[in-house]
Amino acid sequence: MRTRLAVILYVPLLLVLTVVGAAYAVSVARADQQAVYLDRLADTSYLAITARQSLAADDPAIVSGDLGRYQQVYGIDAAVLDQAGTTWATNGLDVAQVDERVAALAGRRSELRTGLLPWTVQRVVVAEPVFDGGDLVGAVVTVSDSQDLSRGVWLSWGVLVAAGLVLCLLVVVVAHRTAGWVLRPVGAVDAAMAQIGAGRLDARIPPATGPPELRAVVARFNEMAARVEHLMHRQQDFVHNASHELRNPLNALMLRIEDLSLTVPPENADEVAHVRAEAARMRSILDALLLLADDVDQGSGVRPVDVADLVARRVDSWRMLAPDHPLVLTSPDAARWARADRTALECAVDAVIDNAVKFAPPGEPIEVSVSGPPAGRADERADGVVEVAVRDHGPGVPPGQLALLTERFWRGPEHSAVRGSGLGLAIASELLATGDGEVRLELPDDGGLRVRLRVPHLHPPTDDPHPLEG
């Protein structure tokens, strides 16, 4: 962006320099031509005095000596014509080849033939009429080579081009530094936004940066960042306090479950164990909320997890919670290890199954499957993931709304009466993202919705002194 702005600043200046330089070059060329012409005109006027004396005395020798010396000293051809246009005296000039003599014999001084380019002026011709007592008696013509004139013009142009190049380099440096000065607040805003996105809510931009217009933008950004930091701290405080408030009734509930386990008949022991496991899982979820509220590193809970065993346990729990929706599990016999946060993955599986239960018609099966590379073998899958797929046979959504399902609180207009808050798939997506996982949504050809939870595959370490989670 800095380069583009520098180009925007540089190009107009370059155009101005080009136009001014071209005009100055033309002016220099014409000035040099005019200077040479005036110099030759002065010589011709001097020769016209001698020519008038020679024509009045009817003696060509009077002017022939001056013409010869003029040729020897300056190398310029010259000639004197009488009133009839006949050559009176010459130092080697063929006057018949000079058209300007006609104007001089008519009593007018010849004009300078100018050209914009040095090579367009082949020679400098000056034709001066000679008068004696007001009567035209002849003319003097001088013809000089234009090599010196062209050499002088080229030298002037060379100096002009060299000065222009130096000025262009100076303009490039100034434009680049100006662009950097103008864009410095933009870079500071980008750096501050990156720091805020990484969790440093106290990141700010130095106020005295860039032009005054952008300083106002910097001030507004700092105000916005301070407001966001304040709101985030308030939100974290709220979640933290709410989690602590929930911990007490949850602990009381777990104590009552333990008391209940001592009095229930043996045939109900499995149900009590199931309730105890669900309560323990709720406590794990509450601990995860506290970690999120405290902004702890989300990768700290990532470790090897047997996805097949985890999904089988959650499906067994949902079979008791949703007896009207048969859950069909397709799971491999061997373990399928993945690198994930166990609590986050459990919550994601629960959110997806809960979404399927809400929208699937009663009696219609909900298909759950686990796939991925088996433990102890090389990864044969190109994507290297373990995948949990949950497919329902509900109404689905239009293709244009598929990408909106993972947005918070979004619900289709036709499903506004269905219970829930519209957070299920959004929560699943965010939970998996903490361990480099992802959620993919598909619309099967025969209707319904298929949700794929994908987490990175992991070969379980054989020398780990701690047992793997199951």
Image (tube, helix red, strand yellow):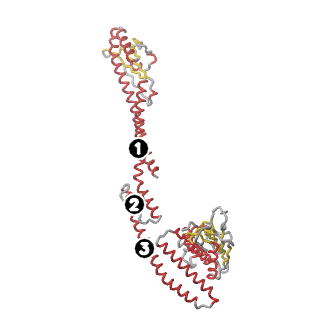
Q: Which residue is identified by label 2?
A: 205
Residue 355 occupies quadrant: bottom right
**Where does the image place residue 170, in percent across and percent down from the top left?**
40, 43
Tag 3, which secondary structure? helix
Tag 1, which secondary structure? helix
Residue visible at 65% across and 80% down?
325
**Where does the image place residue 460, in percent across and percent down from the top left?**
62, 68
Of the residues tagged 3 and 1, which is closer to the observer? 3
What residue type is disc 2 on?
A: Ile
Q: Which residue is identified by label 3?
A: 234
In the current view of this chain or complex, which residue is farthest to the left?
Answer: 133
Q: Say above or below: 138 vs 177.
A: above
What residue type is disc 1 on?
A: Val
- Relative placement, left or right, of 181 versus 407 is left
- Nearer-N-terminus badge (3/1): 1
**Where does the image place residue 10, in percent across and percent down from the top left?**
43, 46
**Where does the image place residue 386, in percent across and percent down from the top left?**
63, 68
Residue visible at 60% across and 86% down?
272
